[in-house]
Amino acid sequence: MLRREFKLKNSIEIKNVLKLGRKFRQESLTLFVVASPLNCSRAAVVVSGKIVNTAVARNRVRRLIFTDLERRLNAWENRGASDMVVMVMNIPSDEKRLLTDLDQCFANW
C-alpha cells in the first residue's frame, strides 16, 4: 500500500490535477498527470459510489491500484516528480483488467 506522504492529501489537490492534468484514457479508467511542485510523486485513486455500491468493493479496487502504483513509483528513477489521479470509470469482471489498462496509460505517458 502506498504510504501517506505519497498520496494527494485533499480534494483541492485532486481537483487541481483533474483540471490541469494530461488525460490518458482506457476502457476502465482514466489517468490524469500533472508536474508536481514537490520533489516526490504523489497519487490518488477515485472510485465513485455510482460505479460500485458497496464500500468494500470500492476499497478493494483502491487497494489493488495503490499497490500497483507503489511498485511503479519505487521503480521510477529517471521520471520527474508528478501528481497523478486514477479515476476508475467502470470495474470489469476481471479486476486484473484494471491493471492492464493502467499499464497502457503509463505506456502512453
Image (cartoon, rainbow, N blue to C red):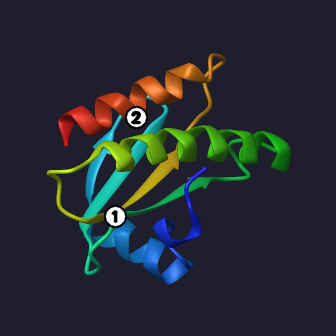
Residue at the spot 14% in from the left edge and 51% down from the top edge: 78
Identify the residue at horizontal 21%, vertical 50% (top origin): 77
99 up-or-down from 82: above or below: above
Q: Residue 33, percent across and down?
A: 29, 58
For marks 2 and 1, give the one nearer the viewer. Answer: 1
Q: Which quadrant: the C terminus?
A: top left
Depth order, front residue of 46/4: 4
Q: Where is residue 31 in the image (x, y as percent from the top left)?
A: 37, 48
Residue 14 showing in the rendered view: yes
The disc, 2 or 1, on the residue closer to the chain's N-terminal end is 1
Left or right of 98, for residue 82: left
Residue linked to disc 1: 41
Q: Which x, y percent locates residue 73?
A: 37, 50
In the displayed structure, 81 sits above or below 28; it is below
With respect to residue 2, does 39 lie above or below?
Answer: below
Nearest the viewer among 96 and 40 is 40
Q: In which quarter of the image is residue 15?
A: bottom left
Q: Is mark 2 on a helix, strand or loop?
A: helix
Question: Residue at coordinates 27% horizontally, 73% vertically from top-left?
Answer: 36
Q: Nearer the viewer, residue 45 or 76?
A: 76
> Would residue 54 be visible to someone looking at this image?
no
The label shown at residue 23 is none
Amino acid type, callout 1: Ser
Secondary structure at badge 1 equals loop
Left or right: 11 in relation to 56:
left
Q: Name the residue under label 2.
A: 102
